[in-house]
Image (spheres, rainbow, N blue to C red):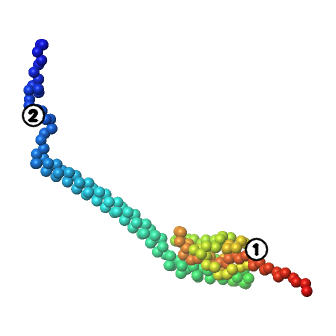
């Protein structure tokens, strides 16, 4: 076998050796159609996912709004009850100075007052304390400025009317008296004439 073997591939003309099939116009149009369909699938998948996300966001927002609506639905009724509760508290402050018969009545009214306060608390309204805290216009309504050295300026000294809030929202600001620094009066220098 000294003679080189004749390989059948070597005998083929070069044009037939091309391993890639020829692309015909039908193949090209099918390829373009496939690419177009893939683009449409991508487009509609993206659109579907966005719609799904929007739907989920809407559901969450509506659920949150519904919870807030339910939480604050009783707000108006609670606010209406706060004033009579305040009047009852003020009246009971003077019961100790009255006759024994009035004191017995006061005990009953104190129990009723406790039930009103419990009902308000059970519906989400809670009182907040103000004395000793810095004045905050979101929580307090200043009714008077008091000159004092006992408290720093801007600190609530006294509470005239208790404030209430539901969750993070103030439903009635507290009426307070706020500390004010004493005015420093400069004395005029004495002149000897």
Q: Secondary structure at mark 2?
A: helix
Q: Residue at x 25, y 57 (%)?
A: 44
Q: Which residue is mark 1?
A: 149
Q: Is residue 18 above or below residue 102?
A: above
Q: Is residue 139 left or right of residue 5?
A: right
Can the viewer see residue 95 in this picture?
Answer: no
Q: Between residues 14 and 123, which one lies in front from this camera angle?
A: 14
Q: Residues within 10 Å of mark 2 (few under 14, many from 20)?
A: few
User: Residue reaching furthest bottom?
Assistant: 193
Q: Secondary structure at mark 1?
A: loop
Q: Between residues 164 and 149, which one lies in front from this camera angle?
A: 149
Tags 2 and 1 touching, CB below 8 Å: no
**Residue 19: x, y in percent?**
15, 35
Q: Residue at x 8, y 26 (%)?
A: 11
Q: Is residue 35 above or below residue 88?
A: above
Q: Between residues 32 and 77, which one lies in front from this camera angle?
A: 32
Q: Residue at x 73, y 84 (%)?
A: 99
Q: Between residues 60 and 153, which one lies in front from this camera angle?
A: 153
**Residue 163: x, y in percent?**
60, 75
In three-dimensional space, the C-alpha distance between marks 2 and 1, rounded to whole angstroms, equals 107 Å
Q: Which quarter of the figure has residue 177?
A: bottom right
Q: Which residue is mark 2?
A: 16
Q: Is residue 161 above or below residue 41?
A: below
In primary-sequence order, the first of circles 2 and 1 is 2
**Quadrant placement of the N terminus:** top left
**Residue 47: x, y in percent?**
28, 59
Can the viewer see residue 15 in this picture?
Answer: yes
Q: Which quarter of the figure has residue 63?
A: bottom left
**Residue 193: x, y in percent?**
91, 86
């Amino acid at each position: 076998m000294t003679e080189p073997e004749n390989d059948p591939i070597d005998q083929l003309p070069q044009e037939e050796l091309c391993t890639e099939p020829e692309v015909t116009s039908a193949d090209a149009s099918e390829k373009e159609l496939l690419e177009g369909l893939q683009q449409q699938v991508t487009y509609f998948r993206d659109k579907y996912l966005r719609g799904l996300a929007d739907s989920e966001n809407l559901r969450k927002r509506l659920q949150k709004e519904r919870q807030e609506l339910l939480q604050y639905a009783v707000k108006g009724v609670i606010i209406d009850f706060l004033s009579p509760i305040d009047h009852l508290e003020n009246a009971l402050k003077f019961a100790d100075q009255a006759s024994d018969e009035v004191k017995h009545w006061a005990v009953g009214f104190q129990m009723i007052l406790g039930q009103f306060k419990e009902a308000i608390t059970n519906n989400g309204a809670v009182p907040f304390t103000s004395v000793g805290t810095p004045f905050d216009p979101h929580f307090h309504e200043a009714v008077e400025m008091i000159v004092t050295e006992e408290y720093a300026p801007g600190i609530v000294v006294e509470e005239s009317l208790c404030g209430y809030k539901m969750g993070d929202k103030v439903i009635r600001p507290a009426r307070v008296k706020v500390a004010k620094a004493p005015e420093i009066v400069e004395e005029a220098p004495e002149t000897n004439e």
